[in-house]
Amino acid sequence: METNCLEKVITQEYTIGQAKPEDVVEAFYIIKIVLADFIQKSIVHPDLFTNLYPNMLREAQNESLYILKNHDISLGLITISKEEPDEFKDVKWESNHNSSLYISRLFVLPKWRNKGVGSALIAYAEELARLKGFSSVKLDVTSSCNEGILLLMKHKYRFAGNIFMNTQKAPINCYEKKI
């Protein structure tokens, strides 16, 4: 991997690149499939309550949305930003907000889970954090999403606390990894 440019990274079978506005339709499709899977599994996710398409278009324009592909087929996505979500203000983080990158969305198509896609996306975010001089990566996962929690535990993320969004009854777990 080139250390001076992460615009497009190739890892084993996967290519990760910054989404352009014309890629948002593919990203939107991934999210809709994942959210349908979440509903089937009774997992309530904050994106169920938002107007996703304009948010994703803004993320692509801000160069914070990345798509993972296998031979030009989109399998997962990640949104990485240096902007701390408002909901994170009361969490007891180890790092201050100025020294962290935030993952606000990490989705993998259900049929591609447990095949290294989520791990590749996390590794990409961590490498981006290192290259840009950040000291940690922070993110949240719905407390009922066991697959997501197991992925974070595998990558040695530390539980930092809970938040509640959109009047949800189940908490959202916050995690951090020092880089």
Image (cartoon, rainbow, N blue to C red):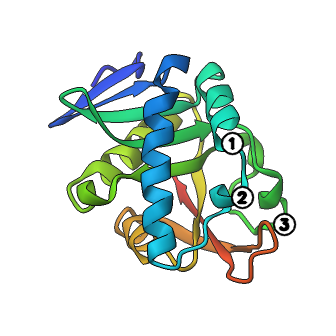
Which of pointers 3 and 1 lies earlier in the amino acid sequence?
3
Give the number of the mark in front: 2 or 1. 2
When the figure is inspected, residue 160 is found, relative to residue 69, above or below; the finding is below
Residue 67 at x, y = what percent?
41, 33
Q: Mark 3 points at which residue?
A: 90
- For the point 39% across and 39% down, the residue is 124
- Under mark 1, the amino acid is Ser
Residue 166 at x, y = what percent?
79, 66
When the figure is inspected, residue 7 is found, relative to residue 30, above or below; the finding is above
Q: Quarter of the image containing the N terminus?
A: top left
Quadrant in the rendering for residue 71? top left
Q: Can residue 16 be seen in this view?
A: yes
Which of pointers 3 and 2 lies earlier in the amino acid sequence?
2
Q: Badges 3 and 1: C-beta atoms under 8 Å apart?
A: no
- For the point 63% across and 36% down, the residue is 53
Q: Name the residue under label 2.
A: 49
Q: Is mark 2 on a helix, strand or loop?
A: helix
Residue 94 at x, y = what percent?
68, 62
Please indicate whether residue 175 sits to the left or right of residue 6 in the image: right
Q: What element carries label 3?
A: helix
Q: Distance between the residues labelled 3 and 2?
A: 22 Å
Q: How far apart are marks 2 and 1 (CA)?
A: 29 Å
Disc marking residue 99: 1
Please indicate whether residue 86 sits to the left or right of residue 73 in the image: right
Give the number of the mark in front: 3 or 2. 2
Q: Badges 3 and 2: C-beta atoms under 8 Å apart?
A: no
When the figure is inspected, residue 42 is found, relative to residue 58, above or below; the finding is below
